[in-house]
Image (cartoon, grey):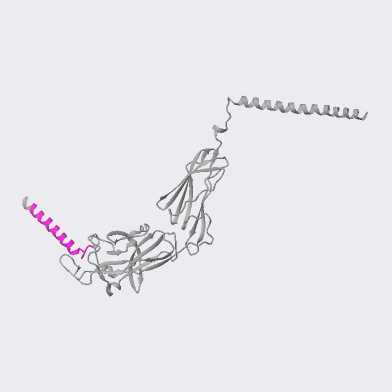
Amino acid sequence: MSARRSLRFCWVAAALALGGARLLAQAPLVDLLSSPSAQLAAPADDFVAEHVRVEVAPLRERAFAGEPLEIAVRVWLERDFIERHLQQLSARRLDLPVQVLCPWLERDLASSNADGASASVALGDRAVAALRLPEREFEQRVWRGFELRARRPSVAAGELQLEAPRLRLVYATQFRSTLLDEREATDSRIAGLSGPTVVLRVEALPESGRPLDFGGAIGRFEMTARVDRSELSVGDTFRLEVLISGDGNLGEFEAPRLAPSSDYRVVGQLARRERDTLVVTYDLSALSRRLIQTPTVTLPYFDPSESGGYRSVSAPPVALRVLQNSARSAPDATNSPALGMAAARSMFVLVAVLVALIAGVPVLLWLWLRRRKRHAE
C-alpha cells in the first residue's frame, strides 16, 4: 500500500515539475505590466515597423468648443507576425500582447463597444478590453487590429495637440524545439513604436442662428416625458420628469427652463445624470383646470455634423386631468341659508327702488305741469 502511495506521489511531483518547467519556459522576457518603466524598449527596427501600424483618428474632422472629443487609437498587426513572432509581455496572458502608453488615453479611456468583439490588451500598467476590429487586407497581407477610444472633456476654442501614443511589444525571430516547448524563443527582445502626433483645430460655436435660450447643448438628442400622476386637483403638486438621451455633452449644459404660465407654478427643478440619460425633474403646482397637459419642454442644441447647425427637440406633452378642489369650491351647509337671505334682501331693495322710480315719475310730471300753468296765469 505504501509502495502505491509512493509511486502516486512520484507521478504527481513529476507532473508538477514538468508543468512548472513549461510555465518557466513560456514566461515572458519581462513583465511590462508589473514594471512598465523597466527595460525601456529599443526603437523598432525595420522588421517590426513593417508588421505593425499605429493610427490616431478623431471620430469627426471638425471639433467645437464645449463638446467632448472622441479620439480613437487603432493598432494594426500583421496576422503572420502575431502567429509566428509576437510573444506575451506579462505573466497575465493577453489576447493581443501589446502595450499602449498614452497618458491622455489612459486618463480619458471610454468603455469599449459592448456590441462588438473585445480583445484584452495592455494600456499602461493594466489590462483592458479593446474593441477588436475586423480583419482587413492591405498590401496583399492580412491585418488584425484593435481600437481604444478616449472621450476627452470639453475644451476651449483653439489648437489642441495630442501627444503621440507609444507601443511596446515583445517579439522573437529565432526559435528552437525543446522537451518542454516546441517553439522556444532564443532571441526575445522588447521593441518600441510611436504613433503620429495629431493637432486638432477646435472651433467656436457660430453666432449666426444661435437661439436666445441656447444653454450649451452640443450633439444630437431625443426627449421623452413622464409624470408621477395624471389626475389631480387644483392646488396639488405633481412631478414632471423629462429624459434627455443621445450622443452629446449630457450633463454639461443648462437644463431647459419652463415658460411662466397662469395655469401652473414651478416649485422646484433638479437635473441628474443616469448613465447615458439626463433626467430633469420639475415639481409643478396646478393652478387652473385649464391645465389639460404638461407644459412643452424644448431643448435647443447645436448639431456638429457636416449638415448640422442649431436645432431644437421637444418632449411630447403628457395629458392631465385637473379637478376642481372640493375643499375650496363646495358650499358650506351652515352658510348656505345666510347667503340665500342676503340675496333675497338685495332683490327686495332693488324692487323697491324700481317701484319708487315708477311711481315718482307721474308725480314729478304733474308738479311740473302745475307750476307751468301758474306762471302762464
Q: Residue furthest right?
A: 377
Give the image location of residue 142, x and y in percent: 33, 70
Q: Residue at x 41, y 53 (%)?
A: 276
Q: Is residue 79 left or right of residue 315?
A: left
194 drawn magenta: no
Give the image location of residue 187, x and y in percent: 20, 71
- Give the total of numbered labels: 0
Task: Look at the image and give the residue range highlighted in magenta.
Answer: 5-31
Q: Nearer the viewer, residue 113 or 306?
A: 306
Q: Is residue 370 left or right of residue 182?
A: right
Residue 138 versus residue 332 in the image, above or below: below
Give the image location of residue 357, x and y in percent: 78, 28
Q: Nearer the viewer, residue 364 or 17?
A: 364
Which quadrant of the rendered structure holds the C terminus?
Answer: top right
Residue 350 versus residue 270 in the image, above or below: above
Q: Residue at x 86, y 29 (%)?
A: 368
18 drawn magenta: yes
Give the image location of residue 55, x and y in percent: 35, 68
Q: Is residue 199 left or right of residue 234?
A: left
Q: Is residue 101 left or right of residue 359?
A: left
Residue 357 versus residue 30 in the image, above or below: above
**Image quarter for residue 154?**
bottom left
Q: Residue at x 71, y 26 (%)?
A: 349
Residue 347 versus residue 147 in the image, above or below: above
**Image quarter for residue 44?**
bottom left
Give the main secondary structure, helix, strand or loop, of the magenta stretch: helix
Q: Nearer the viewer, residue 247 or 114?
A: 247
**Image quarter for residue 137?**
bottom left
